[in-house]
Image (cartoon, grey):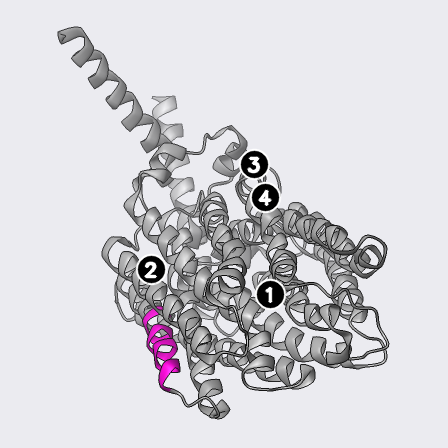
Amino acid sequence: MTIGIGKKDDDVESGGKATRKTSAVAEYSAGSSSNLGIRHLQILLIFLGMTLGYSQRVGMSVAIVPMINASTANPDFEDFGWDKNEKALALSSFFWGYAVAQVPSGYIANIWSAQMLLSIGMLLCGIFNVITPFVAHQWNLVAVCVCRVGMGLTQGCLLPCIHTLLSKWAPPSERARLGTFAYAGAQFGTVIALPISGALAASVTGWPSIFYLFGALSILWSVCFSFLGADSPAKHRSISQKEREYVEESLRIIAKKENNKAKEKIPWREIFTSWPMWAIILAHCGQNWGYWTLLTEMPSYMKKVLNFNIEGSGGFSALPYLAMWLLSFPASWLSDFALEKGASRALVRKISNTIAFWGPAIALACMSIVPKNDSTSALVLLIVAVGLNAGSLCGFQVNHIDLSPNYAGTMISITNCLASVIAIIVPLICDQVIINDETNVYQWNNVFYVSAVIYFLGNLAFVIFGKGEVQWWNDPEEVKARRQIQTRREDVAETQT
């Protein structure tokens, strides 16, 4: 009897605590949209990390022009006279290391610390970037490729770590806005890196200063993030109790599960046999083809076809990414607004992704009808093609977290690994297969046609097979139970035979 009474009292007390916690969470949630908290600081830091990560990638797309021919910028600096094959090699080498590092980074972020892994990765990436001009002078193309591979290896943790951190810091009702703002650092980094790199290349400091500036900023950011960042609300020293409860209750995080995370086995088989997962993979590969085709080739297109100088090429090349960055904010707000009004998460993700893929496909297909001397129309279509990509930030790019908050970092590492292979072959195919004469506008039209078709097919797969709800294999206990049932069935079938 005593035990029964004690248990009842405990239940009442537990129920009271749960009610008070729910009340506190609801109270905090009601004003969360207007209250800036530690979760917003984390998202800001992630945004800046993405900005610097992409600035270091993009800087090479501009720097390589005067590295090949110094007369295009400041002729007082050394150039290397690389041919188009060597140019493609230098541009694609980053993704050799980047692709290799994806899955290991996702696994390490899941079992160790996404915050520390990202801090260390960006620190080393910054160092590789800073030393690139020195090694280029000493050992030419081989050394540049080694540095770019090193940057890829150390920056390979960027998306897996960010996805893992978002799954712990972004409540579902704020996921599109916070996730979009964090990932919009890629576009913002591109926007600032292209004109800044063009100006630096033409300045008295020359093209080496591109590597010095962005590399040094990356090193500085990594130090700041190691002190100000945290893996989750439970591990942050300055977060208020109300905000911590709000985030954790929204995400249904249980402290015991987090402590046992290292003991959980990643359900590789279930992930790779999931149709919604393959929908993301195909969408990610399609987006990478179009995005990196435009990013790596646009400076050359601006220079050789539209006849902009190095400073103008960098500035005008940034306009499409400025449009994408600006459009990402209304896109994310509308996405969350639709969810709040009762729209299904799958529908919102598919509509966002369709705008992001089929809009650019139409714009790129229209490039062929633009007169050769009409640079304004060509630039407008490129702005539309890249700008509408903003919808992907509320589409497939956050869909990993929708499907599996527990394994979002691992999932993004898989999709980004496969998509990075696309980024490797894009400059090789463009520069060695499609384009023989960079001044030939008709050959450039073929580049745009191919990108349009891949955009269309990538989104078609996402529309047909994509989902918006959490998948059953997100729950380790459910995976274990289903595997046991499957094992018993196989044993029974084997016994009967």
Image: 106 above or below 424: above
Left or right, residue 138 beside residue 260: right
Residue 195's quadrant in the figure? Answer: bottom right
- Split into 4 quadrants, where in the image is the N terminus? top left
Magenta stretch containing residue 425, yes or no?
no
Helix, strand or loop at label 2? It is: helix
Q: Which residue is mark 3?
A: 111
Image: 315 above or below 257: below
- Callout 2 amino acid: Gly
How far is the residue under mark 1 from the one under mark 4? Answer: 21 Å
Foreground: disc 1 or disc 2: 2
- Callout 4 amino acid: Ala
Circle nearer the N terminus (1, 2): 1
- Callout 1 amino acid: Phe
Labelled disc at residue 298:
none
Local crowd at mark 4 within 10 Å, few (<14), some, or many (≥20)? many
**Depth check: 325 or 39 in front?**
325
Circle nearer the N terminus (4, 3): 4
Helix, strand or loop at label 1? It is: helix
Q: Position of residue 428 (x, y in %)?
A: 53, 58
